[in-house]
Amino acid sequence: MINVILFCGGPSSEHDISLRSALNISNSLDKNKYNTKIVYIDKNGAFSKAFNTIDTKDEFDLVQQTDTNVAGSIADFLSFLKDFDPADTIIIPAIHGTYGEDGTIQGFLDCINFPYIGNGLLSSAICMDKVTSNDIFEKNALSQAKYLYTYREGFDDDFINRCVSEIGLPLIVKPSANGSSVGVSKVENKEELKDAIIEALKYDQKALVEELIDGQEIEIAIIGQGDKLDASVPAAYITDHKFLDYDAKYFDTKTVAQIPYKMEESYKNEAIDFAKECYKAVGCEGFARVDIFYTKNHKFYINEINTFPGFTPTSFFARLAMDMYDESFDFVLDKLIEDGFRRFQ
């Protein structure tokens, strides 16, 4: 029997989505193979006591009482963990965004020498910081939007003028390191740009300003490492929103998920190859969801890579991975767990 310790929650803006992902994982893990314990992490970063899986359909039932002393709560977790053997214990850090997807939790798990599924510290940190990943994509000659960025401390009117003159309008403004399109704005004119940057800087010390790519965002699930990569068909959310924002993804009932996205076979294969190159460029390992733009003249531009995408029943990664292998979600989880042990060993 393999021990699985499932993290959920976390101090990011995607706390609630993490709970939904964790509940789907918990309900899907084969109880004949895995002894699962859940650890809830609150919005301050405090760990709960480990608890057994819950028979519930409400993700908020995973919310547990935590110690106000964050360091003490982590010490309690380490005390709990000392009775487990890394040879038969793996951690699933189902925490999206800050803390879970930026390399923080991966570095912690590396320090205590326990295996976990998904990307390591470096690729997580690179992909979470969109400025850094954009720089790497540029170095590897991978097509992307024109971009500029500013730090909170250096933001001024000169930067606004540079964005308008060097990139042009309209623009997309986003926090450099945040997820699920939180803090993202589309701006049509110079007057809107300042407010959009101020909004983005509420969520991160850096704001990224990008050229608006006129195209459909398509998403591809990738599993593997190096040249041994499995990739799904492209999928897309069809929405009437200005762009695929948080509400469009999770709450707008008019948003339609198209799996697979309707495109010619040759362009589909080109999209998959492009997604793989982007995945490799930033050193991804384990799995990720690669988001790219597909324009009317059949060009591809990398948008971003999510190193621990949503694992909810409606999330693209889970659905695309099941479609890719023509298997149930528990099969996908088995594969990711096996890969986590392999890379640890």
Image (tube, helix red, strand yellow):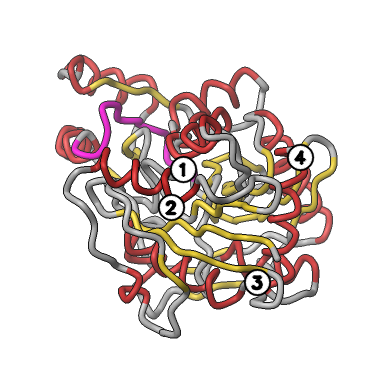
Residue bearing mark 2:
95
Marks 2 & 1, CB-CB < 8 Å contact: yes
Q: Residue at x 57, y 65 (%)?
A: 316
Q: Are marks 2 and 3 in contact (CB under 8 Å)?
A: no
Answer with mark 3 or mark 1, whichever residue precedes in sequence.
1
What's the amino acid at mark 3?
Ile
Label 1 CA crowd tier, 10 Å (few <14, some 14–19, many 20+) = many
Which numbered disc, 3 or 4, marks the residue that appears first in the sequence? 4
Q: Amino acid at mark 1?
A: Glu
Foreground residue among 215 and 174: 174
Identity of the amino acid at label 4? Answer: Gln
Query: What residue appears at the point 42 percent right and 41 percent down from the top-left corner?
Result: 212
Q: Which segment did they paint magenta?
A: 202-213
Q: Nearer the viewer, residue 293 or 49?
A: 49
Q: Which residue is mark 3?
A: 259
Q: Residues within 10 Å of mark 3 (few under 14, many from 20)?
A: some
Q: Where 58 sits versus 62, above or below?
A: below
Residue 225 - label = 4
Asked whether residue 295 is in view, the answer is no
Q: Is residue 209 magenta?
A: yes
Q: How many marks?
A: 4
Q: Is residue 126 above or below residue 292?
A: above
Describe the element under mark 1 as helix, strand or loop. Answer: loop
**Secondary structure type for disc 4:** strand
- Badge 1 is on which residue? 101
